Amino acid sequence: MAVGALWMVGLRLLERAIGFVSTLILARLLVPADFGLVAMAMTVYAFVEVAGNFGFDLALLRDKDASREAYDSAWTLYVMYGVFAFLLLLALAWPAAQFHGDPRLVPVMAVLGLIALVQGFDNIGTVHFRKEFRFDAEFKLMLYRKLVAFAVTVSLAVAFRNYWALIGGMVAQRATGTVLSYTMHPYRPRFNLTHARALFGFSRWLVLARLMECLKNRGPDFMIGRHLDLAALGLHRLSLELATLATSELMLPILRAVFPGYAAVAHDRQALASSFLRVQGSIVLVTLPVGLCFVLMPDLVVRALLGTNWLGATPLVMIFGLSGCLSMFQLTSLAIFEVLGQPQRSMWLRLTENVLLLPSVAIALWSDAGLIGAAWCWVGVQILLVPLSAWLSHGLLPLTLLQRLSVLWRPALGAVLMAVVIHAVRPWLPAVESSVAAFAQLLGLAALAVVGFAAMVFGAWWAAGRPSGPESSLVEWILSKSRPTEAPPVEPHSST
């Protein structure tokens, strides 16, 4: 699980490094309205895509003895949905253009329909990469398609300087992924529907949960695009994606990697509970300091990464960063729900989130609280979801509240010290104007704050008697690497 998490986090870091370079280029070649137009089209596409994300890969991962017919049935269902999604997006293109008053959405959504069609043919055999803990192969697959997408996106942006650069990059990424899935894995799926009923029996709740997640992510886009304008929508979307990097680029890859490990010990609830505590503690230990950088230094983040054209995103990045930090304490429960065959709990959690979020965002927009008021709604909802997710997971694992808190209180202390360090040092630093100076100051402050965070966490761990947890695992790993390797014994031999 740890090795898989390292591969997945390494992949995300490389992808994000590529994405950062891409964002730096695109933010200077495109305008917020270009991002807003693509965000409008993606709002429709995201719902269609998520509706077809049946989670058959999780069903195959949970079943150690899944047959070829099960794999072929999963692939066949994905192909059928790809054809359906293509036709549906074509049918929705004109109504969406009429709704938003922008005819450019028609060709954009037609191209997105082709993406959905191609993606349906992905080789289902790549599930074996995760099932057999071959995360290095999945790393290569995901990285190669990201590199191709980067090259295509930047080339189109330089050539055309409009929204087609973003669409072309998506086409390149999905098409490359489909081709690579067949060149990197020898499995060749065949049309088969014998296991369709069994697969749908597990996936129906996952589909509903993911639809709820998509509604949470894209529902506010509808309201912002309708009530405000494309520039505001682009500002909202890019701020949200930037500020939640700690969860999207660090936390979610770790959860993807640990699911096969959870499935391997799901029969032993005590072992599963122990794994869950270590995973949750490790996730918070790694992602919390990253997320806090967006909360505590949003002006430097925006100026360094997006440029002066996006300074209006500064308060949004701070607020969404706080929401992302809070989400770390409840998202870890989702994998437990799914591995124990309780995906309906994920659905109820996401449904509650939408019932709270969407009306509050609508009220904020229509009461002229604007993007800032809508962003604070995300924070309020996350505060309510943390105890709700703990309550939904109660009884599934033999854990008390004190045991859950035992891996969280030390990172919380580290977060306090991190905030103190940044607020104490920043008044002594010169004001920055250029992106290069802002990046240098951001890097230096973040390094200093993370060192303080780590010192507080490991100091508190030592003072608490060095209990078992993510800190002890890291110390044991460092010590094992620092010990000299013993040379093999030399067999005695007689001289001639």
Image (cartoon, grey):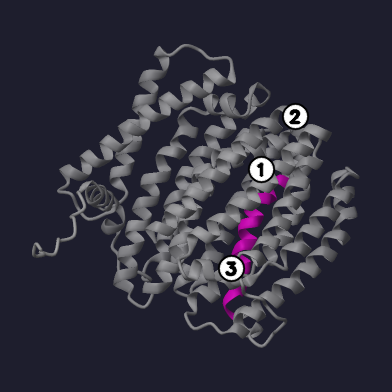
**Is the N terminus in the top left, top right, bottom left or bottom right quadrant?**
bottom left
Q: Residue at x 67, y 75 (%)?
A: 75
Q: Which comes sooner in the sequence, label 3 or label 2? A: 2
Q: Residue at x 61, y 40 (%)?
A: 19
Q: Residue at x 20, y 49 (%)?
A: 484
Q: Decide if residue 226 is in sight here.
A: no
Picture quadrant where residue 280 is located: bottom left
Amino acid type, label 1: Ile
Residue 70 at what x, y percent from top left? 60, 82
Q: How many marks?
A: 3
Find the distance from the CA under tag 1 to the CA under tag 2: 35 Å
Label 1, residues with CA under 10 Å away: few <14, some 14-19, many ≥20: some
Residue 138 at what x, y percent from top left? 54, 60
Q: Nearer the viewer, mark 3 or mark 2?
A: 3
Q: Which residue is mark 3?
A: 126
Prevailing secondary structure of the magenta residues = helix
Q: Which residue is mark 1?
A: 363
Amino acid type, label 2: Leu
Amino acid type, label 3: Thr
Q: In the rendered structure, find residue 195 and report the number of the disc placed on it.
A: none
Q: Residue at x 48, y 27 (%)?
A: 297
Q: Decide if residue 486 is in sight here.
A: yes
Residue 383 at what x, y percent from top left? 46, 47
Q: Which comes sooner in the sequence, label 3 or label 1? A: 3
Magenta residues, start to end: 201-221
Q: Which residue is mark 2?
A: 29
Q: Nearer the viewer, mark 1 or mark 2?
A: 2
Q: Which comes sooner in the sequence, label 1 or label 2? A: 2
Residue 363 at what x, y percent from top left? 66, 43
Nearest to the observer: residue 327 or residue 451 = 451
